[in-house]
Amino acid sequence: MNPRAAKFGAPAGPYTRKPLWKIAEPINTLSHGVGVLLAIAALVVLVASSWGEGVKVITFLVYGATMVSLYLASTVLHVHRWSPAVMQFLRKIDHIAIFMFIAGTYTPLALVMVGGSIGWLVFSLAWAIAVFGIIFKFAWIDAPRWLSSTVYLLAGWLALLFVKPLVDIVPTGGLMWLLGGGFFYTAGSLIFTFRWPNPIPRVLGFHEIWHFTVLAGSICHFILMAVYVL
C-alpha cells in the first residue's frame, strides 16, 4: 500500500486481497452510502419541483448530479480494500468530485438566486476553480494535506468576494443555512488537516468525523436550495 494513501485515510499495511463482501471502512462507507441515497432524493425533489423552469431545472440537475457523484465516489473508495493502483485512481476521482460538487453547489446559487452579470461571474469563477482543482489533483494526488484543504476552502468560500450582493439578495434565513453549510465544511477540512479529534482511530476517528461534517454541510445547503432557491 502506498504510504501516502494511508495518510489520507486508506487502510495501512501491505495490500492483501479481501473478499468483496468485507467492508474495509464500515462507518465511512455507511455515512456516505447514506449520502448517496439522500443526494439522489434531493436531486429528484429539486428537479421535479422546478420542472418546466428551464434554468432552475438545469442548475438543479448540475447540483444534484455533482452531489451524487461526490458521495458515490467516496462510498466506492471506502467500501473495499482495493489494490494500490485502483486505490490511487479512486482517490483521484474522490478528490476531483469534491471540486465538482463545490462548483455544482454554486451553480443554482449563482444563476438562479443571484442572477445577472454578477451571478454569471460567480458561476464562471466557481467552475474555473473546479477545473484548476481537477488538473491539480490529477497531477498531484499526494499533495500535502494542508495544501489540498486550503484549495478546497478557497473554492468553497468564493462567495466572500460577493458578500454585498449576497446580503442584499439572499434572505436572512437563507444566509444562515449558507453559512451553516460553510461552517460544517470548514470544520471538517480542519479536522481532516490536523487529524483531530481522533477518538477511536480507524473506527470513529478524524476521517469518519470529517465524513459526518460533509453530510451536515450538504444537508444545510440542500435546505437552502429547497426553501430559498426553489
Image (tube, grey):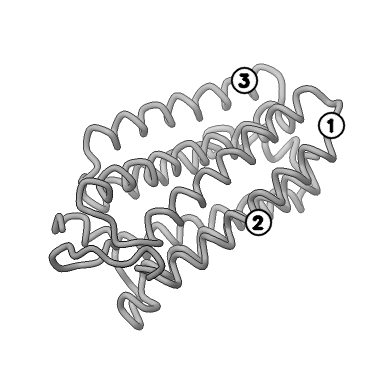
Q: Which residue is drawn at 21% across and 46% down?
A: 85
- State the CA–CA distance, disc 2 to disc 1: 20 Å
Q: How far separated are the C-alphas under marks 3 and 2?
A: 28 Å
**Which image quadrant for residue 104?**
top right
Name the spot of residue 146 as percent of width and height, x first: 27, 52
Instruction: Indicate left or right for 220 with 230 as reference.
Output: left
User: At numbered mark 2, what does the secondary structure look like: helix, strand or loop?
Assistant: helix
- Answer with the quarter of the image where residue 171 lies: top right
What residue is shown with label 3? Answer: 120
Disc 2 target residue: 38
State the residue at coordinates (73%, 53%).
223
Q: Quadrant of the N terminus?
A: bottom left
Disc 1 secondary structure class: loop
Labels 3 and 2: the sequence-earlier one: 2
Q: Nearer the viewer, residue 49 or 171?
A: 49
Query: Which residue position holds label 1?
Result: 51
Q: In this view, does 102 lie above or below 179?
A: above
Marks 1 and 2: in contact by CB < 8 Å?
Answer: no
Q: What residue type is labelled 1?
A: Trp
3 or 1: tag closer to the N-terminus: 1
Residue at the spot x=28%, y=34% of the render? 138
Which mark is nearer the camera, 3 or 2? Answer: 2
Q: In which quarter of the image is residue 67?
A: top right
Secondary-structure class at tag 3: helix
Camera-nearest label, 3 or 1: 1
Tell me: residue 65, above or below residue 52: below
How crowded is the residue under tag 2: few (<14 C-alpha within 10 Å), some, or many (20+)? Answer: some
